[in-house]
Image (spheres, rainbow, N blue to C red):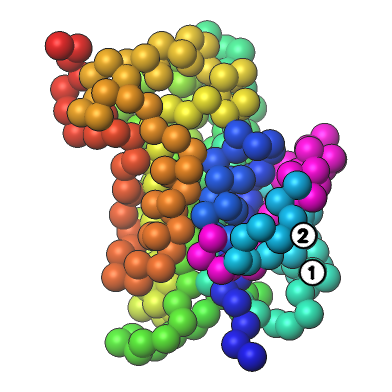
């Protein structure tokens, strides 16, 4: 019997999480999924989501584990111990989704960011993606394909935001952190494309009312309203729309090193309300 494809989806917090929407999309594509959450604080919520999920989709959720990427040993622990404990076979990951970000937004201006605050944002939001990619390769948990060969390839997708390339009010140190993340996507695509045929991309989502966004970004509702008023679609996009692009991108083997915008077209226009 052919094994299902396998996805690792990092950063589930609750039902509103983009990561949870990604899990739903991959399940509908008949993937088995392993989920991670940040700490024990989220364990009950995530486990309840899994229980409610049941067997209503094609794929299965094999389990969920804690992974606080701010700890340097968390990703090695995840890949060397936690993931093997959930698998009965040594399947490599066909898709990996990095939906993890954090910055302390208490400092009122970017210029006032202290090094501890700035470095924490970089570590969690950007460096963790680099470390994750390196560990996946070193632990042989992704497919390794020769150039020009058809067959199985692995995909890594990082979630990002327009603040990586434009100045966004109240986004503070998260903007530079997301810029670093997108640069890492391009660099890792170049590094691991020739050796593994690994495709590495980012999906830049419009402002979605996740718990982290609503609680962390001042005047977040104003960002959403701006998109609704000025984007070509004149509405905000949903986590499900973002997730469907993530899962599609994971199977698009000719695309790598790209940032794909899922924001109703907001990033492509001069935002003037008409």
Residue where numbered disc 1 is placed? 86
Residue 206: quadrant of the picture: top left
On screen, residue 219 versus residue 229, left or right, reads right
**Real-space CA distance between mark 2 and mark 1, rounded to the nearest whole angstrom:** 7 Å
Residue where numbered disc 2 is placed? 63
On screen, residue 29 versus residue 11, left or right, reads left
Of the 4 image quadrants, the one containing the N terminus is bottom right
Crowd rating for badge 1 (residues with CA inside 10 Å; few <14, some 14–19, many 20+): few
- Please report the residue visible at 51 percent of the width from the left and 65 percent of the height from the top: 29
Crowd rating for badge 2 (residues with CA inside 10 Å; few <14, some 14–19, many 20+): some
Secondary structure under badge 2? strand
On screen, residue 40 versus residue 123, left or right, reads right
Q: Nearer the viewer, residue 80 or 123?
A: 80
Q: Nearer the viewer, residue 175 or 20?
A: 20
- The span shown in magenta is 28-51
Residue 124 spot, x, y in % from top left: 61, 41
Of the 4 image quadrants, the one containing the C terminus is top left
Q: Earlier in the sequence, mark 2 or mark 1?
A: 2
Secondary structure under badge 1? helix
Asked whether residue 40 is drawn in magenta, I would say yes
Residue 135 spot, x, y in % from top left: 62, 66
Tag on residue 37? none
Task: Answer above or below: position of 179 versus 200.
Answer: above
Residue contact between numbered discs 2 and 1, judged by CB atoms under 8 Å: yes
Q: Nearer the viewer, residue 248 or 67?
A: 248
On screen, residue 134 versus residue 149, left or right, reads right
């Amino acid at each position: 019997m052919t094994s299902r494809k396998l996805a690792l989806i990092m950063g589930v917090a609750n039902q509103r999480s983009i990561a949870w929407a990604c899990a739903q999309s991959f399940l509908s594509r008949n993937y088995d999924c392993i989920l991670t959450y940040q700490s024990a604080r989220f364990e009950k919520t995530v486990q309840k989501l899994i229980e409610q999920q049941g067997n209503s989709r094609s794929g299965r959720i094999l389990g969920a584990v804690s992974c606080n990427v701010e700890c340097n040993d968390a990703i090695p622990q995840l890949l060397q111990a936690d993931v093997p404990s959930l698998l009965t076979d040594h399947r490599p990951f066909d898709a990996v989704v990095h939906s993890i970000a954090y910055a302390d937004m208490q400092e009122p201006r970017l210029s006032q960011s202290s090094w501890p605050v700035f470095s924490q944002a970089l570590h969690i939001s950007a460096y963790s993606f680099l470390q994750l990619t390196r560990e996946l390769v070193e632990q042989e948990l992704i497919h390794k394909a020769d150039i020009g060969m058809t067959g199985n390839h692995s995909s890594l997708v990082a979630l990002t935001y327009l603040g990586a390339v434009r100045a966004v009010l109240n986004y503070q140190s998260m903007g530079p952190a997301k810029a670093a993340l997108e640069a890492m996507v391009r660099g890792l695509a170049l590094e691991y494309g020739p050796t593994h045929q690994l495709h590495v991309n980012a999906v830049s989502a419009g402002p979605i009312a996740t718990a982290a966004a609503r609680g962390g970004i001042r005047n977040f509702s104003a960002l959403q309203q701006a998109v609704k008023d000025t984007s070509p679609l004149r509405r905000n996009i949903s986590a499900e729309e973002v997730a469907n692009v993530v899962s599609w991108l994971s199977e698009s083997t000719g695309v790598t090193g790209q940032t794909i915008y899922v924001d109703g077209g907001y990033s492509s226009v001069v935002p003037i309300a008409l």
